[in-house]
Image (cartoon, grey):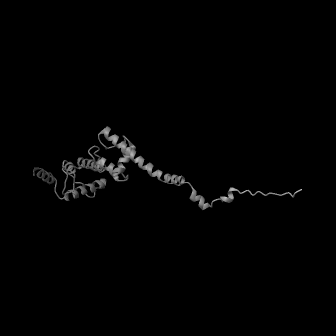
Amino acid sequence: RPPTTTTTTTTTTNDEHHPHPSTEQQQQQQPPKKKRKKTLTTLRPIWNKQSKNDAWFKELQEFRTAMGHCNVTEAINPGLYDYVRKVRKGLIQISDEQRALLNSKEMNFDWEMQKDRDWLIRLDRLKAYKERHGDCRVPWKYEPDQQLAGWVHTQRGLYANGKIRADRRKKLEELDFTWDASLKKGQQRRKNNKVEEN
């Protein structure tokens, strides 16, 4: 009998030809989609905020079309009112295109509305003072309303420097406002009449 020959078969596994990649290699081979997804997640809040502001701007345009003005009150639409208030104060960044639209005749946005409202409130308080005292000569140290006394002083300063708005000057002079505190009662009225005649 011929001797028995034993044949040994060597099986080569895929692991020998393709060893497991290192941790660094795994990170490099990570699909870029995950990285991109992470970046998009980071940017999403910014996009959402901008989209929200754009939506408010569009609503303001619709309000202007329906009402004929952009003077939104809190009672009508609290959310839109807050947006407009922040735009006026510069607390919300708007695009150059949006700013141009606000300044256009189509929208005629009033940037000074809040300041005008505050000014008119002071004017009403001055009217109340005149009804009580008979003139607009609010003393510098007027304890019941020191804020009004400071406002009156400011109006005189603006007038002296030629910086007071014409419409505001007219409203004050309709109350016989005393531009020069050193003038006696009646002198300011004659002075105002003289200016109107000229």
Farthest residue in the left direction? 198
61 is higher (above) or lower (below) than 11: above
Residue 42 position in % (x across, y down): 49, 54
Q: Quadrant of the N terminus?
A: bottom right
The residue lying at 59 percent from left, 61 percent from top is 24
The residue lying at 69 percent from left, 59 percent from top is 16
Farthest residue in the right direction? 1
Is 9 positioned to the left or the right of 175 in the image?
A: right
Residue 195 position in % (x across, y down): 12, 52
The total of numbered circles placed on residues is 0
Farthest residue in the top direction? 66
The residue lying at 34 percent from left, 40 percent from top is 62
Residue 107 position in % (x across, y down): 29, 44
- Viewer-proximal residue, 197 or 153? 197
Q: Is residue 73 in view?
A: no
Residue 176 position in % (x across, y down): 18, 50
- Viewer-proximal residue, 132 or 156? 156
Q: Is residue 87 in view?
A: yes
Is 52 positioned to the left or the right of 186 in the image?
A: right
- Viewer-proximal residue, 37 or 10? 10
- Viewer-proximal residue, 153 or 69? 69
